Image (spheres, coloured by chain):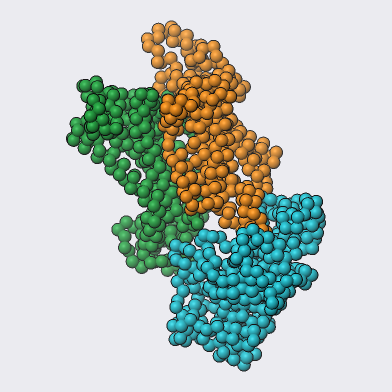
Amino acid sequence: MLRFIIRRLLITVPMILVVITLTWGLIRLAPGNFYSGEKNIPKEIEANIRAKYGLDKPWYVQYGRMLGHVVRLDFGISLKYEGQSVNKIIMSSLPVSASVGITAYLLALVLGIVIGSVAALRQNSIWDYASMALAMLGISIPNFVLGPMLVLLFSLSLYWLPPSRWQGFASRNIILPVLTLSAIYIAYIARLTRAGMLEVLRSDYIRTARAKGLRESQVVIRHALRGGIMPVVSFTGPALAFLLTGTVVVERIFALPGLGNYFIQAALNRDEPLIIGIVAFIAMTLLLMNLLVDITYGFLDPRIRY
Amino acid sequence: MRTSANGNLLEVKDLRTYFETEDGVVKAVDGVSFEVRQGETLGIVGESGSGKSVANLSLMRLIPEPPGKIVSGSIAFRGRDILKLSPREVRAIRGQQIAMIFQDPMTSLNPFMRISRQLMEVTQLHLGHSKQQAREHAIRMLEVVGIPDAEARLESYPHEFSGGMRQRVMIAMALSCQPELLIADEPTTALDVTIQAQILELIKRLKGETGASVILVTHDLGVVAGMTDHIIVMYAGKVFEQAPTSELFEQPGNPYTRGLLRSVPDPAAEQGKLYQIPGQPPDLARLPSGCPFAPRCERVQEICRREFPPFVQLTSEHYSLCHFADEVYAESQRAA
Amino acid sequence: MDDERSTPQHEIEPVKPALTPLGTPPESPIRSREGDIIHTAPEFAIAEADVRSAEAGEFVAGTSLWKDAWRRLLKNRLAVFGMIVVFVVAALSIIGPSIIKKTTGYAPDYIPPDAALIKSFPPFRAPDGAFSWKHPMGTDIQGRDLFARVLQGGQISLLVGVIATVVSLIIGVGYGAVSGYLGGRFDNLMMRIVDVLYSLPYIILVIVLLAVFRRNTPLGQLVLLFVALGSVSWLTMARIVRGQVLSLKNQEFVLAARATGVSTLRIIFRHIVPNTLGPVIVYATLTIPSVMLTEAFLSFLGFGVQPPMSSWGTLATDGIQNIAVFPWQLIFPGVTMAIMLFSLNFVGDGLRDALDPQMRKG
């Protein structure tokens, strides 16, 4: 187990290196740079800027400096938000993204597993068809369409919920962003659970459980659910990566000061330290989360040993 | 112990279990009748797809519905028709009065659950055991089925056992509540030959100790020879022959049974190829109008292809589904 | 089979005498087993014959695998509904804008001179309240006919979906087939690379790529989109094809082809790849909606299709700006896109069920 974790962490290092190098390479290969948007900068000022950010040094020196930042987990100062360190920006925006993202995923787990199980247990019934059609709809509606539509319905027509602005986690403002973000996960998890449950419900050990005389509810909860949600557990890894794109959209729609919003701004502004910082941070988080998911998988399935 | 008037623990009459499939209705079990007496062992023999497993799942109402459906018939267990019981009453019988062992011990135990819990939940459910009682009972059962160091192995997961050991666990689980009827559905098919003999011996021994009746389902006549009192031979969802074990082996009255007997490897005959009944079992959704075995039968006649054969009584307990049952029976007598 | 053939070149395999007893005439080993050649496209005939042989282990007459699949697909009402919707929406998108232009005179980019039209509401009413079919979906904020724009946006959305899928198809099939066929260390290495790419937060790289390389010409941006979307969605395809190839490469017909001296590349792409058609079709069908969704997402962020071109994604994004006053400007493009993706997903699901009977429900 420990060896597995160490091995996985060791693989993680070069992968993060690949991501960062790719990102850095893309930024450098593209024509123009951070200040090229500004018009008519006098030569001396440009030279000053270049010197200030080390852009006058050869590329490998710059690359090395950038790597040094990443290794020290200190990503430097943002170009756009002058004087603000990248770390500070990440730390202040992370709670926003994380609270919305985690709440949405937990909601999706609960609803998705319940809906998927019901659909599997009542296979080919109206419940099955209805929930699967709904799930398909959830997968097919882009969240940036769904979000504004929810706003239209709940805020602008029914006046139940506020349309936007971040007021912290424990406010009603979080409801619509969470709903918007979780819709597609509810749909995916419901489909995965249904497929997993259908397979398990046909398996021999469920027949054994029924032959013991257990009630159907016991058969399902005690025996079937564990195996049935294994696909959901495997999905969690990709889902987290996917969650990122979702939070980007939700943060834009609901004007939340989250990590995704900063990232888009940074990419548009070519704010190199901020881009590298956020990318490195996200890559590390993702790979760590994937490791966590694998470990959880091992705990849930006794047959897997590392 | 209550049984029906004529001493039968189980009486199955005209059982029909059909499946709706895309290719049409599959008559997996089509008009099967048999009895199991108190303390007796009945062997059900047939190739795969003959309906023997479906018949036994029907006994416990474990047929998945849909697509399956028990269309007609009665299953009198101690005089009560299982098919007329409420789901709750059926559950009370399952695991307690009728228990089942399945073919593949690799997949029949829940891989996510420790053996202890899987064993304990049966007695907690049916015998009202406390956790402690159930645990002690589980250890005792594991010892009974010959698992060494039972107490230590109780907390294992199924994958930590070998195939034979898993089947022992299945048997321990099935016998936990001292059922009156044990259905063993191909209990040794998935196991190595040496383990097969051990498992069969175990079933035989435990049957002697508990006085339970046993239905032993197998495709291997060699397995049932030393184990059973009566045998029924199934083919294409029908009972083809029914007889006391010794009589069936000595004087089969059906060409299909004769084919099966010839395909049992005989250790005495040193050389010679192993016989195999030619052809494949029929597609149950598209049965021919005549005898379903006709296309593969070595003594097929015109009438076999045209008319469904009669169920001929040969002796008091010996029946055969064949147009030429008497002739086959007579031939076997001469051969013997 | 694995390490010795480490170079994927056009070299002729030596004829292995041990394989000749398969009794296959040299020129066309596959079709001769079938007895007759029915199809004009040889790959198709091969695919039909051998997917079956791989799955059922025996030959059934004629084209029954694809016929069976087609029959099962037609039985699936949701898939049929999906196919109809996809067909209708695609056809309307392609021919619709020019018809509208001819009949009403509203080109997708035509801004009418009378400003009153800006407030044209969609439920078939003119600004004065009179019943009118002039703008069935209303107009956008500049007064352009939304119906024409939605149909034209469909062209771009579908184009992006299809072309990016084709890009991913080419990369994925090529990569997967080579990896699976070469096997051994090469396979190991190539699949490890795929594993690594899988766990990368690729969408982030795509955003960076699109942001820093942003093209000034709409066409340039479109091509960038094709490349970006196609190059990140081939991974699963590569895995699927590789798995198929692994199970196919030791089949008799491949051995027969090798025995008759067909080159490695030719074996891979003429004999093996056509046999992976089923899963590839299914996955490609499901890739189209997912690519379209990603395109919409990127367009929402401003990295996607650039004006004057528009896709469903950009139209919906424009609509969001005016949602409080002119909600239909979001609803029509948004709902149209959702219906299309919904239908494509159903078609993909239906195809999977039809082509893989074991996965069928029930």
Q: Nearer the viewer, residue C252 or C115?
A: C115
Answer whether residue C316 is visible to the viewer in this image.
Answer: yes
Query: In this rendering, would C119 be left or right of B168?
Result: left
Residue B210 place in picture, x, y as percent: 77, 69
**Where residue A89 sits in the image (x, y, percent)?**
55, 19
| Closest to the observer, C229 or B201 | B201
Please give the count of numbered marks on the rendered protein.
0
Give the residue displayed 41% in from the left and 66% down from the top.
C60
**Image quadrant where one finds the C terminus of chain B:** bottom right
Left of B234 or right of it: where is C71?
left
Position of the N terminus of chain B by quadrant: bottom right
Q: Position of residue A207 (x, y in %)?
A: 62, 58
**In percent of the image, x 69 and y 41: which residue is there?**
A1
In the rendered image, the residue lying farthest to the bottom is: B334
Instruction: Tell which of B246 and C138 is nearer to you.
Output: C138
Instruction: Specify the colour of chain B.
Output: cyan
Residue at 51 percent of width and 79 percent of height: B293
The answer to whether residue C284 of the structure is visible from this angle is: no
Q: Which chain is orange?
A: A
Left or right? Give the position of A238 relative to B286. right
Q: Is residue B220 above or below residue A82?
A: below
For residue C299, which quarter of the picture? Answer: top left
What hue does chain C carry in this figure? green
Is residue B243 shown left or right of residue C314?
right
